[in-house]
Structures are given as structure tokens and as C-alpha cells.
Image (cartoon, grey):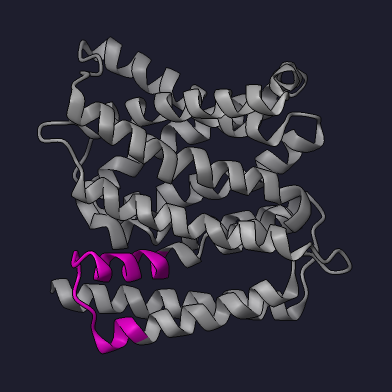
Amino acid sequence: MSPRFDSPLVLLLVTGTLLGLAPPLGKAGIAAGVPPLGWALLISAGTAAVLTAILAARGTPPRLDRARAVYATVTAALSYAIPNALMFLAIPHLGAGYAGIMLTLSPVTTLCIAILCRVRRPTALGVAGIVVGFVGAVVVASTRGEVGRPADPLWVAAGLAMPLFLASGNVYRSLGWPPGATPTELAAGSHLAAAAMLLAALVLAGDAGGLVRIADVPGLALAQVAASAAMFACFFRLQVAGGPVYLSQIGYVGAAVGLLGGIAFLGEHYGPATLAGAVVIAAGVAMTTVAQRRATA
């Protein structure tokens, strides 16, 4: 991989853009009859298959030891299985764009957890960014989704829980990184574990039969797997290059792509308060980003 593509900024933009494709693709797939948990399973199973094939072609299949198994299991739960399940379950009620906006809370939440875990010391600007981001989140949450289709507060809470799990996963992946492990290896193992968790959840929910509906939308499914595999190939590289707080900024890029995709291709409509809240959250994200850069300068 070229040095330019290893730069944190390039990785951030690529990873965030690919992340933002998930909400609109997922909403379209769910509308075609695929169970929400089934779409989350498609992402993890497809990503694990593609990345494992790449590793096998390189002659470096994933290694399995206790440290990697623990890392894969915890990462799978915090970063993939739970937040993706929440996102795709909530999207039919909140809209793809609204669910994407919730991703913008990940950077602020990651900074809070990083401070609590003493991964990063707080600065005045960083704390101010947290407060601003929280205010924006309150504004967005109060609008409860698309115009004329207010969501049940339970689904709003589910959307707000997403960045909490994502942020916990962001910090854990840096703290728990197994010595000598490669980014692609960890991505493949974590998604394999996430796929097993989601399949078990589908079986318990009695929705496993709905997986056959994926065959009705082969184009969407292939686009989702390709985007997800490419995203997670970059995701763990960004973890190494930028650290957990910088990596969390993909939520901002992803939210912009998801919001525009929902409006442009899915006919979603959001009121001025929702869009204003998104701008306020973006301001909070910008403040925390500047604070991080100053702290590492």
C-alpha cells in the first residue's frame, strides 16, 4: 500500500465514505424483505469471507490463539454485531439519514471513554467539543426522525446506543491489540465472530428463513459486501495510523454520505431542526478533532 494511502486523512475519508453507504443500502435491502439482523449478518459474513480469501491468497491465513480469540470476540460484539443490529433494526423506524446522523456522536463518545480510560487527557477545547456535540445530539434526538413520521422514543434510544458501543469498541481495539497481529487478520477474525453472533440471534428470533430474501437483491448484496470488505480493510489500518479518537471521525464522513444518500435516493425528508442539530454535532466533532491534533502536535 502506498504511503499516501496509509495517511490518516486519506484512510479517514475512504473508510467514512464506505461506512456511509451501509444505511441506505441496508434500508433498501430491508424494504425488499431481508431481516434487519440478516443484513447485519451479510456485512460481517461477507467481509470475513473476502478478507480471509485475501489472507489465504497471500499465504498468511489468520492465526488463532487465546489473545486473538478474546480480541475478536470482544471487538465483534462492541464494534459490529451489536451496533449493526441496532442500526438496521432502527433504520425502518428512523430513516437511513437519521440513523447515519447518530454515527456522528461516535467521535465525542470515543473521546469521553478515552479520557475515562486515561488513553487521552482532556483539554478545555476537547471538553467544549463534547458539550457542543451533546447539545447537537439532544436537538437531533428531539426531532425523532423523518418529517411527518416521528419515531417511537425506544427507537431513538436504540439509535443513541449505537455510538456508545462503537466508541467502546474504538478504545478497546487500541488497548487490546494482540502483539504481532496484522490489521487484515484482526478484521477477518472479528467479523467471523460477529457473523456467528448474528446468526445465533437470527435463529433465536426465528428469522433465519428470511436470509433467502438476500437472493432477491443480488446487486444490493454484492454492493454491500464489496463496500464493507473494502471499508474494514482500511478500518484497522486507520486504527493503527490515527488511533481510536481520530478513527472515530469516520462517523462524521459516514453520516454525511448516509444522510445525502437517504435524501437523494430513498426519498427521505428531514426538518430544519434535524439538519441544524447535525451541523451542531459537526461543530463539536471539529472541536474535538482540533483538540486532538493540538495534543499530539
Q: Is residue 270 depicted above or below 173 in this figure?
A: below
Quarter of the image for the C terminus: give it.
bottom left
Which residue appears at 74% of the width and 57% of the height? 94
* Image quadrant where residue 176 sits: top left
- Residue 5 visible within the image: no
Magenta segment's dominant SS is helix
Q: Is residue 91 depicted above or below 109 in this figure?
A: above
Was residue 112 drawn as part of the magenta stretch in this picture?
A: yes
Q: Is 290 on the left-hand or right-hand side of 198?
A: left
Look at the image and give the residue range highlighted in magenta: 107-127
Q: Is 273 on the left-hand or right-hand side of 286?
A: right
Was residue 4 drawn as part of the magenta stretch in this picture?
A: no
Quarter of the image for the N terminus: give it.
top left
Q: Nearer the viewer, residue 141 or 16?
A: 141
- Residue 227 visible within the image: yes
Q: In this view, which residue lies farthest toward the right? A: 148
Q: Is residue 104 depicted above or below 128 in this figure?
A: above
Q: Is 43 on the left-hand or right-hand side of 191?
A: right
Q: Report x, y in % for residue 291.
A: 27, 79
* Image quadrant where residue 255 sits: bottom right
* Image quadrant where residue 212 sits: top right
Q: Report x, y in % for residue 27.
A: 72, 43
Q: Report x, y in % for residue 225.
A: 54, 28
Which residue appears at 54% of the width and 83% of the height? 135
